Amino acid sequence: MSTTPVIVPIDTPTLGDRSYLAHDGSVALVVDPQRDIDRVLALADEAGVRIAHVFETHIHNDYLTGGLALAEATGAAYHVNAADEVSYARTPISDGDVVEVSPSLRVRAIATPGHTFTHLSYALESVSDDGIEAVGVFTGGSLLFGATGRPDLLGHEHTSDLVHHQFSSAHRLADELPEHTHVLPTHGFGSFCSAGSTGDTTASTIGAEKRQNPALTQDEEKWVADTLAGLDAYPAYYAHMAPGNSTGPSAPDLSTPESADKETLATRIASGEWVVDLRTRTAFAAGHVTGTLNFGVDGQFATYLGWIIPWGTPLTLLGESPEQVAEAQRELVRIGIDHLEGAATGSPQDWTDAPLGSFERAVFADLAQVRHHREVSVLDVRRTSEFDEAHISGAVNVPLHELLDRVDEVPSGEVWVHCAGGYRASIAASVLAARGVHVVAVDDSFDEGAKPSGLPIAAA
């Protein structure tokens, strides 16, 4: 008799990743855990299972792993590719190795290079009197939903080799696994580790991917060309993740940051330190401490803050509540920003005695109207690829992640700043407002609002 294993996805939407807890009701395994392992421990405790094995599909580029800390906390075996050069003790695993998790559950390693050279996928197999059946496959940054992991994160000189490996790896999984096998990727939910669009899909199988994934429906030459042509910018903090993961991140310190008073905040802002307001972009625009920056914890907070902040810059957080600060702190430790100078909670009136700063919010229809009455500049902070696809005629494109280095390219006078949906525009507006620019933040969908408003749209 066989028991179908329970597979619990653990989502980290702000980074676009998933980890997994799988168990048979007694013994569990974990794949690609994020650094805040308390989430995993709580789920295992709730299910009443013991974590016996932790698996890494690859040395991650977009977050610091919790794998080593989780293995140390639970006594689990920590499976990392034998070919990976790491500075900690691990249980080496290689292509074809089988790990017996329990009498009814086992994991088989499958070499799937492409995202990295040493990438492994793991087939989750149930064992019964009837034989061995593949239930799911943890594909990490290999086969994603309708896409694959990007092949360029190890450097331009390796991209050509890796993209061809990625194609072969996708086909290996499709050829070796039954069509009913669940595809369980780590990336592809908004992660910049994805090459190509994964859409809104939240579940898939090998059979479904055979029908819809370009890596499995196109010939190799066309797929490689399309994949390389579609590669876009990725967060700057990625450069720090693989080295950190190779040395083995410790468990994070999530203790409450030191409280910062008004005078301390003023001093930090004046000295050029980053003081980040975690509130929504609506709240920030209505009133904020002048000189603070708005990275709402309600969006891709860690991705964009980690991308833009000069690495190592002292950081203080402002939140409406201790819970909001704690949420942001949890996001930050996932990408290796462990130390906070401090935090303050409440409202802007609690953080300064000076007059509050503010700026207008608008929609594209407002921009269309105002251009009839006075001259304003339009700043588009989307990535170059987005701008090239379609943009407002006459707009200046400075991608958000380049804004700090190119702020002198921002037009003078009244600047209306927009992105694709409003989140990045608010970050950019806060950067410009801190420099005294007269800014209006367009909080609107570009796809749904710009063209219907009558604004002239051009393509590069």
Image (cartoon, rainbow, N blue to C red):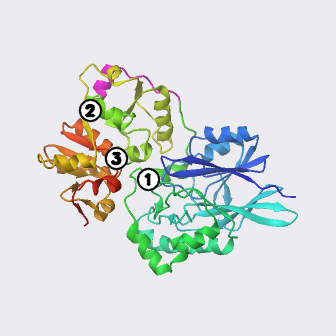
Tell me the CA gap for discs 2 and 1: 27 Å
| Residue bearing mark 1 | 238
Q: Viewer-nearest of labels 2 and 1?
A: 2
Kindly tell me whether residue 275 is visible in this rendering.
no
- For badge 1, the amino acid type reads Tyr
Tell me the CA gap for discs 3 and 2: 17 Å
- Position of residue 61 measured from the top left corner of the image (x, y, whole percent): 49, 55
In primary-sequence order, the first of circles 3 and 1 is 1
- For badge 2, the amino acid type reads Gly
Figure quadrant of the N terminus:
bottom right
Asked whether 223 falls inside the magenta stretch, the response is no
Image: magenta residue range: 255-268
Left or right? Give the position of 145 relative to 176: left
| Residue bearing mark 2 | 291
Which element type, helix, strand or loop, lies under badge 3?
helix
Asked whether 265 falls inside the magenta stretch, the response is yes
Mark 3 burial class by Cα count in 10 Å: few <14, some 14-19, many 20+: many
- Position of residue 116 measured from the top left corner of the image (x, y, whole percent): 52, 64
Q: Residue at x 48, y 52 (%)?
A: 62
Left or right? Give the position of 265 relative to 74: left
Q: Viewer-nearest of labels 3 and 1?
A: 3
Mark 1 burial class by Cα count in 10 Å: few <14, some 14-19, many 20+: many
Mark 2 burial class by Cα count in 10 Å: few <14, some 14-19, many 20+: many
User: Quadrant of residue 137 in the image?
Assistant: bottom right
Kindly tell me whether residue 365 is visible in this rendering.
yes
As displayed, is residue 203 above or below residue 288? below
CB within 8 Å, label 3 to label 1 = no
| Residue bearing mark 3 | 424
User: Quadrant of residue 179 in the image?
Assistant: bottom right
Q: Residue at x 20, y 55 (%)?
A: 395
CB within 8 Å, label 3 to label 2 = no
- Position of residue 405 measured from the top left corner of the image (x, y, whole percent): 25, 49
